């Protein structure tokens, strides 16, 4: 069983920055593709970013490219999402997810991820 715990959410003004963290409960975290998703108010959950087990491969949804950076520290079993130039439309509950299959594909599909955190709220005021 993999437990994921997110932190770092909060209220920030437009143009500001936040860094989200997600810590996993397992040592073999370093073998997993990790992803970040978000669910805006009243909308479906959507993909934000994914990172390969080594950190060398990253993938972003177009709306966050150039503003968000995903990274990981396998020694700390932690994946990060650095968010800059935040916009009100970035307001959402942000979830991290682990893909425990042997595939190295950086999927943007929810169904490809096996474990999810509880989410952390990010609110961007205008």
Image (cartoon, rainbow, N blue to C red):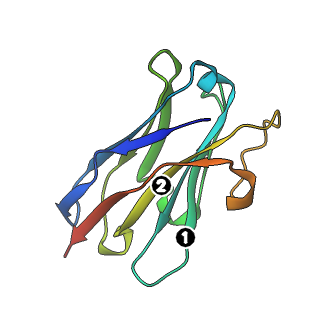
Per the image, label 1 sits on a secondary structure element best described as: loop
62 to 83, vertically: above or below: below
Q: CA distance from mark 1 to mark 2?
A: 9 Å
Location of residue 29 by image quarter: top right
Q: In the image, what residue occupies the spot 49% across and 34% down?
A: 71
Q: Check contact, mark 1 vs mark 2: CB within 8 A.
A: yes
Residue corresponding to mark 1 = 45
Left or right: residue 13 versus residue 47 is left
Q: Residues within 10 Å of mark 1 (few under 14, many from 20)?
A: some
Q: Residues within 10 Å of mark 2 (few under 14, many from 20)?
A: many
Q: In the image, what residue occupies the spot 41% across and 56% down?
A: 119
Picture quarter with the C terminus = bottom left
Residue corresponding to mark 2 = 95
Left or right: residue 21 versus residue 110 is left
74 to 60, vertically: above or below: above
Q: In the image, what residue occupies the spot 53% across and 20% down?
A: 74
Per the image, label 2 sits on a secondary structure element best described as: strand
């Amino acid at each position: 069983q993999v437990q994921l715990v997110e932190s770092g959410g909060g209220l920030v003004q437009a143009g500001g920055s936040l860094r989200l963290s997600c810590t996993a409960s397992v040592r073999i975290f370093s073998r997993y593709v990790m992803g970040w998703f978000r669910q805006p108010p009243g909308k479906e959950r959507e993909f934000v970013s994914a990172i390969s087990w080594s950190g060398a491969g990253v993938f972003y949804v177009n709306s966050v490219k150039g503003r968000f950076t995903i990274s990981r520290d396998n020694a700390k079993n932690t994946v990060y999402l650095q968010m800059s130039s935040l916009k009100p439309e970035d307001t959402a509950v942000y979830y991290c997810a682990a893909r425990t299959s042997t595939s190295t594909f950086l999927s943007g599909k929810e169904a490809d991820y096996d474990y999810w955190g509880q989410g952390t709220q990010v609110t961007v005021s205008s």
